[in-house]
Image (cartoon, rainbow, N blue to C red):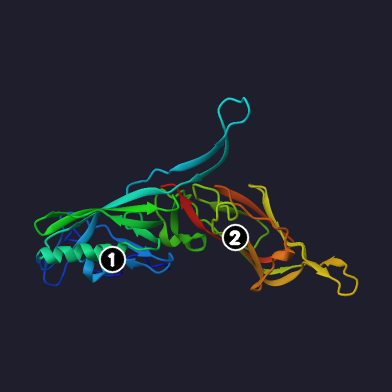
Amino acid sequence: MVQVFSTKKDVPSMYPFLLPTENGVGARKYYYYQPIEYSISADGKTWDSCFDIPDLEGVYCYRSPDVQPAVQTDNLKKVGLMDGQRLLSSSYDTRQITMQVVAMDNIDESDSLLAYDALQRFLVSREAYWICFSQWPQRMYYVKAKLSAPTFTANSWSATVTFTDLIGLSRSVTTSVNYEDYLGFGNNFPDKKLHYTFTSNYFTVYNPSNVMIDPQRRGHELKITLDGSSSGNMKIVNNTTNTEFGRTGMVTDSKDGSKTKKSNFNGRYVINGVRPTLNGKSDYLNCDGGVIVLDKGPNIIEIQNFSGKVSFDFPFWWLS
């Protein structure tokens, strides 16, 4: 299971009755607002929570990003004398999301300045990273941060952190194979349990994303793993999107140069985006160059000439 947020028991809170201490309610500080936890990660797997950074004690987010509007960029073309323009392509563009931060009751001016410096040191980086907020813990954004100058009041200050969401979509913290670790409302999950590992040759793969999963044109992650064997001419067909991937391997005779089909295999076959491998070795030259694309919602998948287990591993993408 991916551990995104702090495992500390004494995380900052505005509710004293939730976390009593041995010395009573008065033994620890509570806030007039509920501090919102946020965590950052370079790879989306190992996370650092703001609550686990000692220098950020007393520096808390009191408002995380709201539901964000998607920003679309359309490529249009005027065709002859036809009215209007024709849509050639469309993609989601970068957008700005913000959070509000406050630091209260610093010891003195120097302590206040150091608190702001610690926040900047934690969030500002030359490299982009993933960020996740406890208000919507199933989703993460790929961002770069910029802090406003602090607004001081006595020994306290407030600031706005503006994140540039580089992808323009939110991504699930987990992928399809362990999606139940981070379930939540508003993520297009149906009432029934979803399955992404199958032993039959005809099944349904459900994509709860707001967009199609397209490894080739959109660069989305999609890893299809087949553990088993094929007597030859293995083919995966998505009847919903009319996309397919086939293995039609060829063997060249060393004497006369003739080519014959030999596409049987046994072991692990992995299609990672657009890169196929057989037992860890590249198998691209033995394939037909096809790519599987998943539509939004249910996808009817058929696998021909294969016996074994197959799994579909991909993250989900949402507009907000």
Residue 49, by quadrant, is bottom left
The answer to whether the residue labelled 1 contacts the one labelled 2, judged by CB atoms less than 8 Å apart, is no
Nearer to us: label 1 or label 2: 1
Q: What number is the disc on residue 61? A: none
Residue 52, by quadrant, is bottom left
Q: CA distance from mark 1 to mark 2?
A: 35 Å
Residue kind at label 2, given as amino acid type: Gly
Residue 271, by quadrant, is bottom right
Relative vertical location of residue 185 with respect to residue 11 in this rendering, above or below: above
Query: In which quadrant will I find the N terminus?
Result: bottom left
For disc 2, the marked residue is 273
Residue kind at label 1, given as amino acid type: Arg
Name the residue: 28% across, 66% down. 121
Label 1's element? Answer: helix
x and y percentages locating residue 260 in the rendered image = 85, 66
Q: Is residue 6 left or right of residue 300?
A: left
For disc 1, the marked residue is 121
x and y percentages locating residue 88 in the rendered image = 58, 39
Q: Is residue 4 left or right of residue 31?
A: right
Extreme residue toward the right, this view: 256
